[in-house]
Amino acid sequence: MDKEKNALIIVDVQKAFEDKKWGERNNLSAEENIRKILTLWREKGWQVIHIQHMSDNPSSVFHPKNEGFAIKELVEPLEEEVIITKKVNSSFIGTKLEEFLKLNDITTVVITGLTTPHCVSTTTRMSGNLGFNTYLISDATAAFGIKDQNGKYYDAETIHNISLATLYDEFATILTTEQLVNEVF
């Protein structure tokens, strides 16, 4: 990992995910782990990028006029930190993320956030495909239980683990918060 040319990307850690409509969630310590990593990045003076999902639908929990749009206080951006809003699952589509990373000579990204099978996975896949040295922090993301097209329910832990398995080794290096902090830095 290039310690000088890296960025921490925090995807969609927003109050919208506190809504009961999502159902059961795994890894309730994800935000605390993100906070630990964020603290390290700030101490080192490294680049931090907050991604914030924004819906155009006024009834969406992610609409800017709704409380859910706000980034959770635990990882609230500092004034000098970059905030990029997006409207789709990928943090790279319709945003200036790729351009920002390239303009700042960032070659390594560390991805955290919500949720593992959706915006985190899509952002991780694209990061790897775009050639960035990509790290996904397994315990600094979380999933909700979901039903498939046949109505079969998959619990949050299963969804989370399968999502990580589909990204492992092909799109990203998967580490825990402890591995990132103790072994990489």
Image (cartoon, helix red, strand yellow):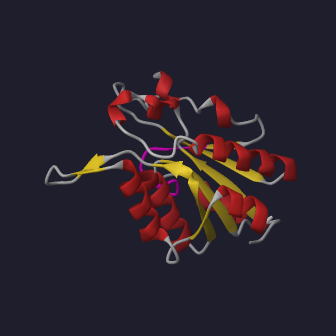
Residue 61, x across and y down, in percent: 40, 29
Q: Nearer the viewer, residue 184 or 88?
A: 184
Image quarter where the N terminus lies is bottom right
In this rendering, would 133 be left or right of 161? right
Give the answer, above or below, for where 110 lies relative to 95: below
Residue 39, x across and y down, in percent: 78, 44
Residue 27, x across and y down, in percent: 51, 46
Check the image and name the residue furthest to the left.
150
In this rendering, would 119 be left or right of 48? left
Residue 161 position by quadrant: bottom left
Give the answer, above or below, for where 63 lies relative to 36: above
Residue 83 position by quadrant: top right
Image quarter where the C terminus lies is bottom right
Residue at the spot 46% in from the left edge and 22% down from the top edge: 66
Q: Nearer the viewer, residue 74 or 84?
A: 74
The magenta stretch is: 84-93
Residue at the spot 53% in from the left edge and 42% down from the top edge: 12
Check the image and name the residue furthest to the right.
44
Residue 92 painted magenta: yes
Residue 24 position by quadrant: top left
